[in-house]
Amino acid sequence: MLEANLGASAFEQHALRAQILGELHARPTRPLETPARVLHFGFLLDSAQAEADRLAVVDAALSRGQPGPDPQARQYRVEMAGVSLTWERHGEFVTHTWEFTNAEPQKLFDPTPAALMQKVKLLPQPGPLLVAADLHLIAGDADPSKISDIFEPLQPAVSEANHGRALIASDFAPDTFGFVRIAVVNRSMPAIAAGRLTQRLLEIETYRTLALLGLPEAQRLGPPTREIERELPRLLAAMNHAQGVGQNRQLLDDLTGLATQLEAEAAISQYRFGATHAYNDLVLERLEAIDETALPDYPSFNGFLTRRLQPAIRTCFNMENRQADLSRKLSRAADLLRTRVDTEVEQQNGDLLRQMGERVQLQLRLQQTVEGLSVAAITYYIASVLMKILEGIHEAGAHLEPTIWTAAAIPFIAGFVWWTVRRIRRRHEAE
């Protein structure tokens, strides 16, 4: 008990420690005795289909007294009579691998895969089938030419693997039953090495198929991307001749529309092209891991896939780069045009402000003119009233001359009226 308390389990464990440590052993390599026949299937699915597929595997395992995979399991293996099923769950697909052992073959790929499928109770199909491989592992030292004859009329890739201890061959094309056939001749490999080589070859077939899912997407994006590439130079040329805010704003709307269309397509294809990158890297890693040695007169697996697969992969990468380059160009053009529009709008605003200033000055002068006229008019009116008053007083017998007194009062009246009008205007300006 004391020794257990002194171990690493005595410490509080990080919540992700078990998951991190278990990742290295999530898909262990299992020994494979020679001879063996392997039917390998890969299905694309979503999260709901993945869970339904796991439950189907659980039901199959429970019927044989086994617990089945838990929700976090990445791989599970259930043994049956003469056949075993290896179930693996990946990010966007699952694989079902059926292994048939203890059956001495009469020749390669005999019996047919259709006959083998009838001997097992296959799981329900979880999603669309993408990968179907028929791998046959036999013992001996077969002549490469005899193995090549099996794949006629196509020329297969034939090479040595695992430091010459095995001979591998495949034409990477579906046969009449829809399977891609892979032949493996075990010269001197132990069971663990045979299992490792078989696993690598099936992974190459799986990942190279998944990597090519990006090609139809790249081909679909070709026409709209070319249309944007043709439209962009036209808009850039129109920018040089555009005059006024209206034309520049229309060009900006056109550029924004192209950018929106491009970004929408890029958002859709981003995951697929990213997955193509990852799957292609896995294919190259697995090709290196099989320790292949090329044979005279035959293409190797590496040479065959490099020649046939990489052009498609480069098409996907090229489309991804074209999208990124177009996005940068559209962004720069939109920024330049937006700057031009902002500058023209600011210039228009400046002109409007200057015009408003001129109008204010004109209104001020008009106001001053009106004020002057108002002072004169009010002064005249008051002087006229004063004149009438003085005339009345004169007629009443007072000794004063109305005209002289009125003339003397006009400067004082005008000053008083001017002072009053100015005071009223200042009060309004303060408000």
Image (cartoon, rainbow, N blue to C red):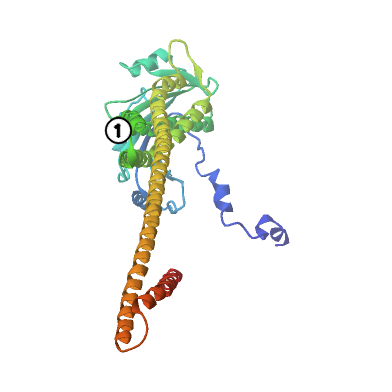
Instruction: Identify the residue at image location x=36%, y=53%.
Output: 55
**Is 17 displayed left or right of 247 in the figure?**
right
Q: Nearer the viewer, residue 302 or 119?
A: 302
Give the farthest residue toward the bottom: 396
| Count of marks overlaid on the render | 1
The answer to whether any part of residue 130 appears in the image is yes
| Residue 66, horizontal then vertical, whole percent | 43, 52
Q: Is residue 137 left or right of residue 10?
A: left
Residue 92 visible somewhere in the drawing: no
State the SS at label 1: helix
Residue 31 position in % (x across, y down):
50, 35
Rendered position, 406 above or below 278: below
Label 1: which residue?
Answer: 224
Amino acid marked by disc 1: Pro
Q: x%, y% of residue 249? A: 33, 42
Q: Quadrant of residue 91?
A: top left
Quadrant housing residue 234:
top left
Say which quarter of the image contains residue 391: bottom left
Which quarter of the rendering shows the N terminus? bottom right
